[in-house]
């Protein structure tokens, strides 16, 4: 079936047309693909390619001469005036293309017709993706650092869903191992302390007195804290531990004092903390499809099976009472401990088993979101998959840098185990979930993020979230006022060709980019580019708003401008939805 070129988006039309032109030229490699970009200076056009310069060395001709040949062939055989208004050559051989107004009006009509679906595509139709993110240990509440992970993972998932992929969001929590035992012991110590409190009715009972604590002072890097003498040296010091202990005392009284081990304290703490984590994520707009627990890997024997499979491939050996993985034979400088001399596995072994489980679930792509502290460890997981004959190329690891909170220009000190961390809930209490999501999404994951609390709370154009939401609210206000004077746009009758002002054309060009922006952000796993794009849309609308009056203008022009404002609202609303941010109609 022949392809209707006029059903294509501009960039795809140019890519195909240029590809056909290049295939007619002598000595151009058959696998050469022209690259298209958006010029930094809009005066240079809407799209540009440097393919002439890329081919210069291979063809042994000046790039400008090659560019002239490409342009001549394009204009003779591939030029469609519906898409392209002009083609020019700049500098050493850049080829610049300018969109025709007819194409712009067609795309604007598409935006208006699709409404809430504008920006969606079928790029990933039929493909399944697993996105594992957050995955914080159930030993405490989610902190600011976990927030960046949550927003990054969820926004990537949303971008993929808008691009047609079937996405599963998964949270992997480590509920096995030493950190859980320390958690249980921390709660038990605080539980005994709560029971012995003078305000408790059973504080003087014999059983309670028997478990009464002496106290000691723990010196921390940033101060001191008093804890019961029985409190673990590396125990969890947050007030949430005391709250869990108080609830246990309320429900069970002193009945848990005679427990032979800390299992019941550990279970209760895990359940409470996981429940709080789920509530925090829901508040942030993150809904997990699956919670996968590490302990299940031990219960099903998956950890043992994974170790046996590595041993069967002669990639395991014993030394100094520990079990080692021969990673030095796989490109790493040294070998890696999988089981300590104590018999307890390191994180790498269950993590490899977990990824084996992921591979068996037949996802086309598995995406892991890790903090920068994992940069040296995750390659061992991929090496394990390779040794076991699994396709590690299906696993994509996204590493994000950490977050610094700033207040009045000063860093807010945080220490997760020392009880002076800032929780994600506290951050949302102060700046709202919308602001939290946008600030975490607006910078590249590869860059350290400074979260400016003063800016986040500011209700002005300096605050990017306020600026975007205010632009959307202003559009809603304009449309409401127009409706009050019976100025209602009908897309079928609106003459979009009346949109000729420089600010109108510039805004159209911004608005219609959303579908391609979503696809490119999804493919690159880079949500920050969507945030940057939406800022550009809002800025273009502001220029349009100040240059092109709607109410009070001649009716046909007013209706056309209303249609453009409506399309801008659609783009902002849909883009904010992908970022997980609301688009208020009033501010």
Image (tube, rainbow, N blue to C red):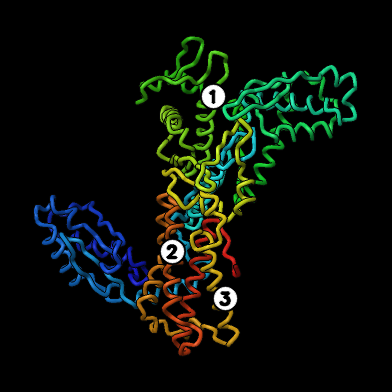
Task: Decide: few, some or many residues near mark 3? Use Cα within 10 Å; few <14, some 14-19, many ≥20.
Answer: some
Secondary-structure class at tag 3: helix
Q: Which dot marks residue 305?
A: 1
| Residue placed under numbered mark 3 in the picture | 477
Which of the two labelled residues, at mark 1 and mark 3, occupies the earlier sequence position? 1
Please report the residue visible at 72 percent of the width from the left and 30 percent of the height from the top.
Answer: 267
User: x, y (%) of residue 465?
Assistant: 52, 59
Q: How would you rate the neighbour count of disc 1 (Cα within 10 Å): few for under 14, some for 14-19, many for 20 or more?
A: some
Front position in the image: 560 or 306: 560
Between label 2 and label 3, give the one nearer the viewer. 3
Task: Name which quarter of the figure residue 542 lies in.
Answer: bottom left
* Label 1: element kind: helix
Query: Position of 84 compared to 282: left or right?
Result: left
Give whichever of 446, 153 is nearer the camera: 446
Residue 277 vertical position relative to residue 175 in the rendered view, above or below: below
Residue 14 is left or right of residue 196, and the answer is left
At mark 2, the secondary structure is helix
Q: Quadrant of the N terminus?
A: bottom left
At a point 54% along the width and 54% down the height, the residue shown is 456
- Of circles 1 and 3, the one toward us is 3
| Residue bearing mark 2 | 514
Residue drawn at (40%, 65%) of the image? 513
Q: Earlier in the sequence, mark 2 or mark 3?
A: 3
Q: Residue 18, percent across and down?
A: 24, 63
**Nearer the N terminus, badge 2 or badge 1?**
1
């Amino acid at each position: 079936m022949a392809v209707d070129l006029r059903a294509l988006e501009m960039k795809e039309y140019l890519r195909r047309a240029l590809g056909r032109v290049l295939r007619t030229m002598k000595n151009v490699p058959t696998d050469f693909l022209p690259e298209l970009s958006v010029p930094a200076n809009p005066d240079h056009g809407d799209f540009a390619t440097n393919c002439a310069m890329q081919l210069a060395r291979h063809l042994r001709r000046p790039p400008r001469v090659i560019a002239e040949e490409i342009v001549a062939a394009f204009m003779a055989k591939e030029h469609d005036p519906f898409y392209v208004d002009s083609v020019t050559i700049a500098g050493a051989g850049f080829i610049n293309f300018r969109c025709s107004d007819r194409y712009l009006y067609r795309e604007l009509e598409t935006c208006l017709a699709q409404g809430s679906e504008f920006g969606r595509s079928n790029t990933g139709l039929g493909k399944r993706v697993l996105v594992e993110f957050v995955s914080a240990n159930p030993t405490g509440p989610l902190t600011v650092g976990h927030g960046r992970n949550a927003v990054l993972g969820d926004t990537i998932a949303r971008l993929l869903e808008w691009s047609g992929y079937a996405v599963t969001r998964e949270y992997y929590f480590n509920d096995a191992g030493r950190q859980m035992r320390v958690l249980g012991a921390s709660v038990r110590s605080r539980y005994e302390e709560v029971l012995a409190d003078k305000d408790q009715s059973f504080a003087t009972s014999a059983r309670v007195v028997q478990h009464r604590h002496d106290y000691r002072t723990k010196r921390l890097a940033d101060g001191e804290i008093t804890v019961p003498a029985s409190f673990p040296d590396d125990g969890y010091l947050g007030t949430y531990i005391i709250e869990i202990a108080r609830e246990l005392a309320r429900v069970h009284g002193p009945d848990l004092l005679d427990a032979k081990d800390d299992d019941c304290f550990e279970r209760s703490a895990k359940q409470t903390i996981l429940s709080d984590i789920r509530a925090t994520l829901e508040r942030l707009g993150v809904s997990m499809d699956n919670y996968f627990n590490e302990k299940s890997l031990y219960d099903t024997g998956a950890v043992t099976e994974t170790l046996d499979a590595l041993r069967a491939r002669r990639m395991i050996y014993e030394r100094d009472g520990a079990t080692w993985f021969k990673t030095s034979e796989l490109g790493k400088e040294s070998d890696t401990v999988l089981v300590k001399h104590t018999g307890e596995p390191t994180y790498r072994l269950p993590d490899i088993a977990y990824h084996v489980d992921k591979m068996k679930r037949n996802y086309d792509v598995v995406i892991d979101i890790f903090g920068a502290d994992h940069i040296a460890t995750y390659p061992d997981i991929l090496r394990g998959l390779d040794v076991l004959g699994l396709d590690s190329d299906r696993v994509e690891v996204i590493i994000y840098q950490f977050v610094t909170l700033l207040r009045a220009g000063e860093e807010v000190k945080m220490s997760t185990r020392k009880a002076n961390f800032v929780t994600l809930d506290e951050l949302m209490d102060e700046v709202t979930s919308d602001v939290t999501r946008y600030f975490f999404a607006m910078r590249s994951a590869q860059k350290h993020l400074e979260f400016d609390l003063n800016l986040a709370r500011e209700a002005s154009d300096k605050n990017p979230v306020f600026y975007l939401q205010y632009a959307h609210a202003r559009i809603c206000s304009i449309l409401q006022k127009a409706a009050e004077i019976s100025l209602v746009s009908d897309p079928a009758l609106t003459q979009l060709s009346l949109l000729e002002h420089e600010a109108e054309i510039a805004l159209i060009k911004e608005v219609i980019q959303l579908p391609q922006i979503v696809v490119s952000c999804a493919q690159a796993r880079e949500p920050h580019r969507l945030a940057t794009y939406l800022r550009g849309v809002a800025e273009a609308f502001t220029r349009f708003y100040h240059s092109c009056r709607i109410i009070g203008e001649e009716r046909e022009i007013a209706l056309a401008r209303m249609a453009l404002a409506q399309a801008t609202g659609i783009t902002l609303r849909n883009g904010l939805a992908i970022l997980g941010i609301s688009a208020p109609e009033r501010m």
